[in-house]
Image (spheres, rainbow, N blue to C red):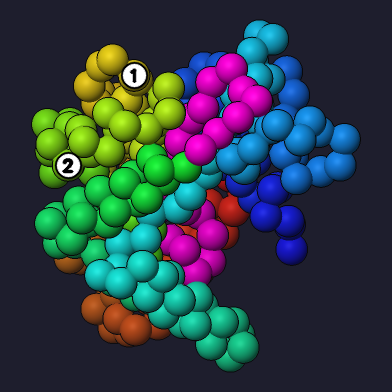
Amino acid sequence: MSSKFEQEKARVELLMQRVGLVAMEYRDPQASGHARDETGADVIAVIGGCRVGIQVTDLDTGNIPGEARAAEVKLAQDAESRGGTYATWAQNQPDQVLAALARIIARKSRMSFAGFDQFWLLVCCGTPQLGAIASTFLITPWLDTGKLDKITAESLAKCKYTRVFIHAILGVEEQALYHWQRGGAWSKSTLAEPPEDRGPSFWDYRSDADLLRDPDGWCDREIARCFAERRTKV
């Protein structure tokens, strides 16, 4: 299993690919040899000679922080022990997800940083990791930037971050990235889904003989196929 730093660096690398930036180097702030005044970051990215300290966290959509993630991890572990796959529902109540985002940003905005040219916060959603996909999932089509401005304005006005990102690594209907920069407001960008990545529609499923004959088995096979495809892409 990869280390905490390697997992967080992988999330930062996905963000860099999305925004078109190239880091000359990634550093672990916990590794020996770094200056003692470099504090508060999970990953250090060196971009064009600028040292960026990046805090990396996953969205937790549960009502109680950690509860949804812990429940999904248990489902994944139980399924793995049986040699099968697990299935669960993602949080689909907008108010609760907004509250979770506000909670994360408010908590992180209180952190102090030192020793960097810029400080970023990266909140990852739809994390492509067993035990994290559903509990970190964000349904982005209904989340507009006006709502984000409203729930985060007070926290961001007091924070030391220069940029904040909400990156939906896995999504539904769109691949979304939300971005806030000091002195500005939230913006949203989406990537069109390539035709080869688009799944069947409702009308295709409606006439699927395997689904009609064995819905439980069909569901297990589809989940296993999706996980396998995502592992090869990430």
Badge 2 amino acid = Ile
Q: Give yes or no for residue 124 being in the magenta stretch.
A: yes
Please, which residue is most extreme toward the top here? 48
User: Which residue is labeled 1 in the image?
Assistant: 182
Q: Position of residue 192 (x, y in %)?
A: 32, 28
* Depth check, front residue: 74 or 81: 74
Query: Which residue lies at the image location 74% right of the left edge and 63% below the top edge?
Result: 1
The answer to whether any part of residue 134 appears in the image is no
Q: Secondary structure at mark 1?
A: loop
Query: Which residue lies at the image location 69% right of the left edge and 10% below the top edge?
Result: 49
Q: Secondary structure at mark 2?
A: helix
* Depth check, front residue: 225 or 105: 105
Q: Which residues are magenta?
A: 112-133
Cα distance in 3D space between marks 1 and 2 = 16 Å
> Where 119 sits versus 28, above or below?
above
Query: Which residue lies at the image location 52% right of the left edge and 17% below the top edge?
Result: 20
Does label 1 or label 2 sit earlier along the sequence?
Answer: 2
- Tell me the quarter of the picture where residue 91 sits: bottom left
